[in-house]
């Protein structure tokens, strides 16, 4: 398998060159010129190894080899081809490259599979150009609604519909979804530092966390910083600081896998000599257990309301994202474990703290994920990187997994 090192490096470099940003990183956004070049280039690569290629209505690319014994049972692998603005060289696209190289290796080594094998390059996941995420996977499963994007435009004012049509694609015309997919396996960089910290090259993902995201607004009273006694103040920053401190203390006490982040704050009037009258801030909470996530966030909401009342502040809590945790298929997870054990590959069973296309697939078909380490946990950034030997170990795990799922009777 030594030749896999060269193939991984060459293919990552090739795909990374499409949309390479002059300032570093990659910008390849849904339906832009580089996106189309990448999809057409991947179509050509898929065809070269004997896969039958096709695009669906919205631009998802498929490369398929029919199974010799169970052609109506499909084992699928791949990820999304779009990037964030000025993103890294692995997020999404490594999953496509690895799936392509895994199928290439399997066909060259073992010939036609018993079950059909299919590589997918999904149109979009990131939501970086238009205000909509998972456009690729949601269309595959009939979850995307035309009315959700019909009036959407990007930052330059280009309409979603115009960009789609210019690329040669259109809305789905049927609600019919596929019944042949028996397993979906997505390999991805971790986008965290767990694997790097514990020194494991492979993660087998058994759960994708649920997420709740809030925007919270506190209204107090802006007043003179010199002439307003402390006991007379309705200081929005003071209330905010107590809420954040109390919530993070409780999150630390709850421990893994719960995580809590206060990531954005706006202060009005944001002036050195005025008591802050208004604070708007965000809260992001994630957990692998739906009940635990619900219980924790409800407790934090109650704490915030109590703190606001104590300090004479009005509070508005807007829960604008409420995504449930998505467990991976126990059957497919065990198949990945068995495949790695048989090949003596070193792995860690773990959850994903980020969202992926797999969470859409898992609602409809047996699904699991493989992770490879991220150096320093960095992602969505030109500095995003994984050691080449770790990428190859991940590819070996995917090859072994797809062999078990598609070649074993």
Image: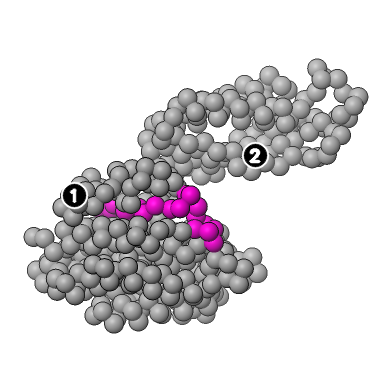
**Which quadrant holds residue 244?**
top right
Residue drawn at x 67%, y 41% is 265
**What label does residue 281 carry, if any?**
2
Q: Is residue 358 above or below residue 99?
A: above
Between the residue at mark 1 and the residue at mark 2, the CA separation in whole angstroms equals 46 Å
Circle 1 residue: 341
Q: Nearer the viewer, residue 78 or 156?
A: 78
* Residue 269 in the image: above or below residue 230: below
- Residue at screen point 67% across, 21% down: 309
Q: Quadrant of residue 155?
A: bottom right
* Residue 180 visible to an observer of this rendering: no
Q: Nearer the viewer, residue 82 or 100?
A: 100
| Residue 181 disc label | none
Q: Nearer the viewer, residue 406 or 359?
A: 406
Describe the element under mark 2 as helix, strand or loop.
strand
Q: Nearer the viewer, residue 96 or 311?
A: 96
User: What's drawn in magenta, residue-wise?
Assistant: 365-384
Q: Position of residue 278 (x, y in %)?
A: 75, 35
Q: Residue at coordinates 46% horizontally, 39% vertically from top-left?
A: 286
**The stretch drawn in magenta includes residue 282:** no
Is residue 225 among what the camera can see? Answer: yes
Q: Position of residue 220 (x, y in %)?
A: 76, 29
Element assignment for label 1: helix
């Amino acid at each position: 398998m030594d030749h896999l090192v060269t193939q991984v490096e060459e293919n990552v470099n090739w795909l990374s060159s499409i949309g390479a940003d002059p300032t570093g990183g990659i910008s390849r956004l849904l339906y832009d010129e580089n996106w189309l070049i990448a999809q057409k280039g991947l179509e050509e690569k898929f065809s070269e190894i004997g896969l039958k290629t096709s695009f669906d209505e919205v631009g998802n690319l498929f490369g398929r080899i029919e199974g010799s014994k169970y052609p109506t049972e499909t084992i699928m692998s791949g990820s999304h081809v779009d990037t964030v603005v000025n993103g890294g060289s692995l997020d999404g696209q490594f999953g496509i490259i690895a799936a392509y190289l895994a199928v290439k290796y399997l066909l060259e080594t073992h010939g036609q599979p018993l079950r059909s094998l299919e590589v997918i390059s999904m149109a979009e996941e990131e939501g970086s150009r238009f205000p909509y995420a998972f456009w690729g996977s949601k269309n595959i499963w009939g979850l995307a609604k035309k009315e959700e994007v019909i009036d959407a435009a990007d930052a330059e004012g280009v309409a979603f519909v115009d960009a789609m049509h210019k690329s040669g694609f259109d809305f789905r015309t049927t609600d019919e979804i596929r019944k042949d997919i028996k397993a979906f396996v997505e390999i991805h960089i971790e986008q965290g530092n767990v694997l790097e910290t514990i020194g494991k090259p492979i993660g087998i993902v058994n759960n994708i966390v649920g997420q709740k995201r809030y925007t919270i607004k506190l209204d107090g009273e802006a007043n003179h910083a010199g002439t307003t006694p402390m006991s007379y103040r309705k200081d929005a920053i003071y209330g905010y600081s107590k809420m954040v401190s109390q919530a993070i203390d409780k999150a630390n006490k709850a421990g893994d896998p719960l995580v809590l982040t206060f990531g954005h704050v706006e202060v009005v009037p944001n002036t050195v000599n005025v008591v802050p009258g208004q604070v708007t801030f965000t809260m992001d909470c994630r957990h692998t257990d739906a009940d635990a996530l619900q219980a924790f966030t409800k407790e934090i909401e109650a704490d915030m309301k109590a703190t606001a009342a104590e300090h004479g502040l009005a509070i508005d809590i807007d829960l604008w994202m409420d995504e449930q945790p998505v467990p991976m298929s126990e059957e497919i997870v065990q198949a990945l474990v068995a495949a790695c054990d048989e090949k003596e590959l070193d792995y860690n069973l773990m959850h994903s703290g980020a969202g992926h296309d797999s969470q859409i697939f898992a609602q409809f078909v047996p699904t699991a994920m493989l992770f490879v380490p991220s150096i320093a946990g960095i992602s969505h950034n030109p500095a995003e990187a994984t050691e080449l030997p770790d990428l190859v170990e991940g590819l070996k795990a995917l090859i072994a997994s797809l062999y078990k799922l598609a070649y074993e009777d």
